[in-house]
Amino acid sequence: SAASDVYKRQEQGAEILASGSIPGQSQEMEFSNFERSKRAFQRRQLEGTELNFRKWHRFVSRDAAAGARPVDILLARLREVAKTQRSAADAHGRRAILKQVTENAQPYPNAVVGFVTQLESELLAIWADDTIGHMQEELTDGIAGYCRQTIETTFPFAEDGQHIDLAAFGDFFGYGGRMEAYYQKHLRAYTQRDGRGGLVPREGSLVGARLTPSLLQQFTHAERIRQAFFAAESDRPSVRFTLRQMKGSDDVTGTLVAFGDRQVEISPTSTAIGLSWPDETAEIAFSLLPQKTGEANFVVFDGGGWSMADFIEGDGGQTIGPQVDISHLVGARAGRYRLSFEGLTVPFLMPELRDFQCPQTVE
């Protein structure tokens, strides 16, 4: 009936009022929110345009503190960068000049900042190519050829090779030698150390990222050889160690040891003697005591500077850090000896000597 319809509409109206939602109001609120968002967006656009305009204004206006316009300062620095492209400026010098451009670009207009950023990226790539090319040229001329002729085919790098001359060994591996000089000049700026002290590419370096793992591995080997065989800042090999006799065959009471002109009698109960390679070890001879008639009593190692390596290898032994126990069989009797070296390893047994290969390529 008409009365019931009126009553229902009244109830619905009461419910709407109680909810606080009036027909048409939600659409008006949505439109109002849209307008506010639109105006906020437009305001941000205007502020961005105004900020960029202010940047351009400052860019072309004279700076009282600097005494010149920023645009003129930037152009002058870019001319300096261009000069480095035409000159023989070193890589570090070129990067320092470019850094002056990029570090001061932040206040510039966005378009100028983008230009500077792109210029930096392109120049660094070009300079990396130049650096790699120069590094390869010097590696080929100063390291690879010499290494193949003098190092690679000689003992202790080649098991059956002729013993390497000690002067050549120092010239190549010693402090200030070919490998260290190349590292200091070409690799140090582009590499860093891993957890084990090995060389790896420097984080963030374009040149470092292009260096071959093999190249860095060989220079790591060379550094460890240098630390084991050479005193600080010296290109002359020198290794200090002590020698003492251990308990061997029951019928061996001692040993008469001769290192060149120096002769010393040692026994399992005597203290260790100090020695230096290569000064005292060009010729090594020892005789087991007491000597026995009709039997072999002595052994001689007379291979020159590297006789020490033959003496240490002996008839097998055990190595713990810088200490090695060796055994020599003379006739039917065995003499056992312990050698303790200064440093962290036994230099003549270090794997880097066997693993070293002549570096050939940079990239």
Image: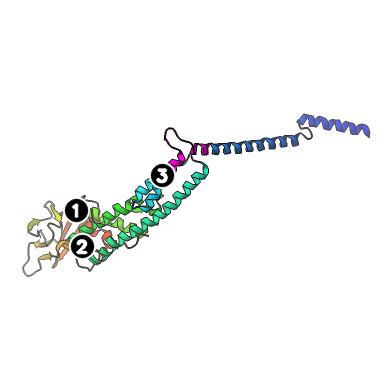
User: Which residue of the protein is positioned furthest toward the right in this rendering?
Assistant: 1
Between residue 104 and residue 269, name the one nearer to us.
104
The residue identified by callout 3 is 77
Of tags 3 and 2, the one toward the viewer is 3
x, y percentage for residue 283? 12, 62
The residue identified by callout 2 is 313
The residue identified by callout 1 is 340
Q: Is residue 230 visible?
A: yes
Amino acid of disc 3: Arg
User: Which residue of the protein is positioned furthest toward the bottom in this rendering?
Assistant: 294
127 relative to 22 in the view: left or right = left
Judged from the image, the secondary structure of the residue bearing numbered disc 2 is helix
Amino acid of disc 1: Ser
Instruction: Establish if 354 lies above or below 185.
Output: below
x, y percentage for residue 217? 33, 58
State the extent of the magenta-drawn residues as a range: 54-74
Judged from the image, the secondary structure of the residue bearing numbered disc 3 is helix
Dot placed on the residue nearer the N-terminal end, 3 or 2 = 3
Quadrant where the image shows the N terminus: top right
Q: Residue at x 50, y 44 (%)?
A: 112
Q: Residues within 10 Å of mark 1 (few under 14, many from 20)?
A: many
x, y percentage for residue 17? 79, 29
Question: Are the residues tagged 3 and 2 within 8 Å (C-beta)?
Answer: no
Q: Residues within 10 Å of mark 2 (few under 14, many from 20)?
A: some
Q: Residues within 10 Å of mark 3 (few under 14, many from 20)?
A: some
Checking the image for residue 6, the label placed there is none
Residue 264 magenta-drawn? no
Between residue 237 and residue 276, name the one nearer to us.
237
